[in-house]
């Protein structure tokens, strides 16, 4: 055998040994992955220009994807959060009430329609006249879901959030007081409790405003009942001119007296 043949034979043996060793080491999938990562790291370390180009391309791709994802997510969540209903989708009686309130209190009919529909639904479950619930809302906040009185009554129904914080627990906490539908549900529950305790709507309204143990409720109960009667007439198909809106709630009683227990504290206190 010549020297060149011996060299070729040696190279073949060497290559065969290397290939055999390579396959023995990398027969496992994890070993192959590890080697691939190692070679990639070595390559990127040796070639900074390749690493920089890869980083720029990756960042460009992420930035291009982010606006589309944010736009899609925001749109869906905004629709889900919208508290509005087309009044044309309501029963005739509810739509009539919604349009009347919208004109009187200068509030868009769509969010008012959602509140009217919810008031009717709650009224059916709690045996409360829905127009009474809406009348309390009208006098308390003028349908401003972000209203707050100096003593801490909050939202559409001016619920005393600190006093009735337990009623907000199932809705995620006291910040839910500014969610219109949640505030309406909690306020209606408190109103129902007040009427049951007093034994009459007039007396329940005095409890609601925090004047149960006072001689004067500053005309609060009379204002709510008057608005209730107007809404009942509207709901029954009568023509009632939406005169001056009661957008400025009545003042809270000036001389509060001690109450027997914390649960007798008012659900609502009007803005001064």
Image: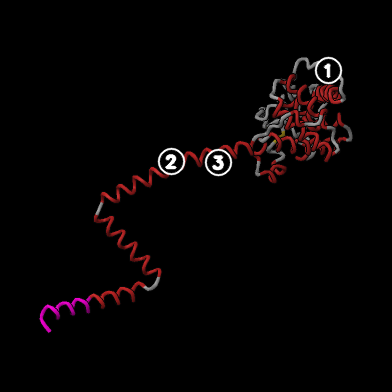
Please tell me whether the stretch drawn in magenta is mainly helix, strand or loop.
Answer: helix
Q: Residues within 10 Å of mark 2 (few under 14, many from 20)?
A: few
Q: Is residue 173 visible in this depiction of the protein?
A: yes
Residue extending farthest to the bottom is 1
Alpha carbons under labels 2 and 1: distance apart: 57 Å
Residue extending farthest to the left is 3
Percent across and percent down for residue 54 are 33, 49
Asked if the residue at tag 1 contacts the one at tag 2, i.e. Cβ–Cβ closer than 8 Å, the answer is no
Percent across and percent down for residue 42 are 27, 60
**Which numbered disc, 1 or 3, marks the residue closer to the eye?**
3
Identify the element where label 3 is drawn.
helix
Q: State the residue position of label 3.
A: 73
Q: State the residue position of label 2.
A: 64
- The image quarter containing residue 220 is top right
Query: In terms of depth relative to the viewer, which is nearer, 264 or 171?
Result: 171
Q: Is residue 272 visible in this depiction of the protein?
A: no
Q: State the residue position of label 1.
A: 240
> Who comes first in sequence, dot 1 or dot 3?
3
- The image quarter containing residue 74 is top right
Q: Check the image and report above or below for 77 versus 210.
A: below
Identify the element where label 1 is drawn.
loop
**Which numbered disc, 3 or 2, marks the residue closer to the eye?**
2
> Who comes first in sequence, dot 3 or dot 2?
2
Find the magenta span and give its range.
1-14
Position of residue 201 in the picture relative to residue 136 (left or right) = right
Percent across and percent down for residue 95 are 78, 27
């Amino acid at each position: 055998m010549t020297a060149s043949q011996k060299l070729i034979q040696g190279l073949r043996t060497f290559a065969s040994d290397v290939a055999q060793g390579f396959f023995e080491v990398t027969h496992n999938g994890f070993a192959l992955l590890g080697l691939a990562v190692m070679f990639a790291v070595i390559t990127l370390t040796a070639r900074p220009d390749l690493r920089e180009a890869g980083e720029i391309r990756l960042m460009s791709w992420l930035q291009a994807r982010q606006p589309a994802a944010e736009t899609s997510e925001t749109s869906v969540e905004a629709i889900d959060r919208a508290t509005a209903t087309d009044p044309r989708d309501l029963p005739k009686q509810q739509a009539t009430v919604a349009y009347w309130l919208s004109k009187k209190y200068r509030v868009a009919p769509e969010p008012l329609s959602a509140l009217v529909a919810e008031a009717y639904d709650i009224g059916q479950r709690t045996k409360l006249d829905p127009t009474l619930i809406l009348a309390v809302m009208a006098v308390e906040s003028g349908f401003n879901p972000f209203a707050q009185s100096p003593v801490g009554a909050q939202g559409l129904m001016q619920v005393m959030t600190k006093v009735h914080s337990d009623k907000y627990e199932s809705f995620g906490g006291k910040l839910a007081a500014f969610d219109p539908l949640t505030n309406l549900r909690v306020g209606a529950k408190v109103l129902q409790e007040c009427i049951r305790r007093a034994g009459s709507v007039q007396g329940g309204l005095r409890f609601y405003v925090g004047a149960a143990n006072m001689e004067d409720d500053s005309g609060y109960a009379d204002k709510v009942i008057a608005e209730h009667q107007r809404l009942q007439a509207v709901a029954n198909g009568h023509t009632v001119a939406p005169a001056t809106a009661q957008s400025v709630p009545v003042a809270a009683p000036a001389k509060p007296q001690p109450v027997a227990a914390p649960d007798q504290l008012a659900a609502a206190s009007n803005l001064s």
